[in-house]
Amino acid sequence: MDRKLQEGINRNYLPYIAGVSKSIIFGFCFMFTKILLNHFDIFSMLAVRFALAAITLTILYLFGKIKVNYRGKNMKGLILLSFIEPVIYFILETIGIRYTSSSEAGIMMAIIPIFIILLSIVFLHEVPSKKETLFITLSIFGVIFIALMGGQSGEKGSLLGYVSMFLAMIVAALYNILSRKLSDEFSPTEITFAMMWIGAISFSIISIVYHGGVEMLPNILRSFSNIKVFFSLVYLGIIASIVAFFLNNYMLAKITAAQSSVYINLSTVVSILAGVFILKEKFYWYEFVGSILILIGVWGTNYFGMKEKIRR
């Protein structure tokens, strides 16, 4: 294949393939997280997940399979990014989900793309086109529609839950903006490597303090004998943490923050389908309608975003 043609394909299509792929991977995370939470508390689960990811990446580095070089680079910015996500984001999201209803959490998380668009305009000077904005809004509405129709029980959350979810939205948006900004200096591998190690160290310290450092390790080792737990940890620790975050960081390095934001909502569709086909959960009409709206939104944002990129 002609080299220029290959470079054109990589430049124009690979970021979108990466976005779809990471959305599919993240979409299955909720299912595997539910399995692990039957055996771990949230912080022990996160500690094991990111420790597995960090150790795996370190082994790959030692065997020369990946390259990492931080010499002379903006380490303060990278460390800040790594604390923003996964550490601060996962803590806020966990508190928010615990103290709000699932529908309220779903609605608030669907609004993350709006924060990303606003921050990308201010800090990156990336202004989405009217058509891109229309389709991003359509995907947001699809998630909100599913959450509203599925949350008619009248269950309400607490102020702590609302504040935590609101802060989680801002943190998630900041991660997208900062990762894109740092992509000029760091490779996706270098960003992912730092995120996994800081996540592993931070959540391990939190978990040890939470457990008093006595029962944590024996409980973890006993849980590994369960095949479902083992597979779930491999999925979350390697596939979701290493592969998906790498794809996400790669995507953020190649396309605008606004274009990348729409993939957050695509994970909702994957989560629904995973629940239906694997966990045998019911599939409601409003989930179908909302999923169609999300998929149209993703397609439209990709299509018109790619046209703008080719035009330039």
Image (cartoon, rainbow, N blue to C red):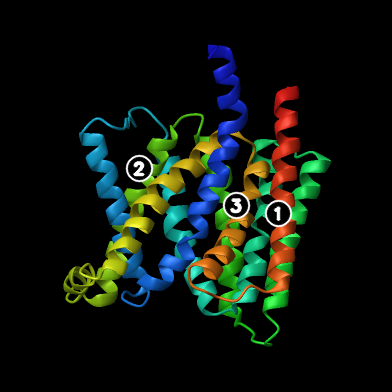
Q: Residue at x 70, y 56 (%)?
A: 294
Judged from the image, the secondary structure of the residue bearing numbered disc 3 is helix
- Residue 66 as seen in the image, left or right of residue 269: left
Write down the residue under mark 2: 193
Q: Badge 1: few (under 14), some or many (20 or more) residues near its Cα, within 10 Å? A: many
Q: Decide which of tag 3 and tag 1 comes sooner along the chain.
A: 1
Give the image quarter of residue 204: bottom left
**Relative depth, front residue between 26 and 72:** 26
Q: Decide which of tag 1 and tag 2 comes sooner along the chain.
A: 1
Q: Residue at x 64, y 48 (%)?
A: 261
> From the viewer's perspective, is the residue at label 3 or at label 2 nearer?
2
Q: Amino acid at mark 2?
A: Phe
List x then y, in percent, for residue 272: 58, 66
Q: Is residue 174 above or below residue 304?
A: below
Q: Residue at x 53, y 53 (%)?
A: 24
Asked if residue 180 can be seen in this view, the reply is no
Q: Badge 3: few (under 14), some or many (20 or more) residues near its Cα, within 10 Å? A: many
Q: Is residue 228 above or below residue 118?
A: below
List x then y, in percent, for residue 242: 38, 47
Judged from the image, the secondary structure of the residue bearing numbered disc 1 is helix
List x then y, in percent, for residue 16: 60, 38
- Residue 291 as seen in the image, left or right of residue 88: right
Q: Amino acid at mark 1?
A: Ile
**Which dot marks residue 114?**
1
Write down the residue under mark 3: 173
**Which dot marks residue 238?**
none
Q: Amino acid at mark 3?
A: Ala
Q: Residue at x 57, y 35 (%)?
A: 15
Q: Is residue 10 above or below residue 168?
A: above
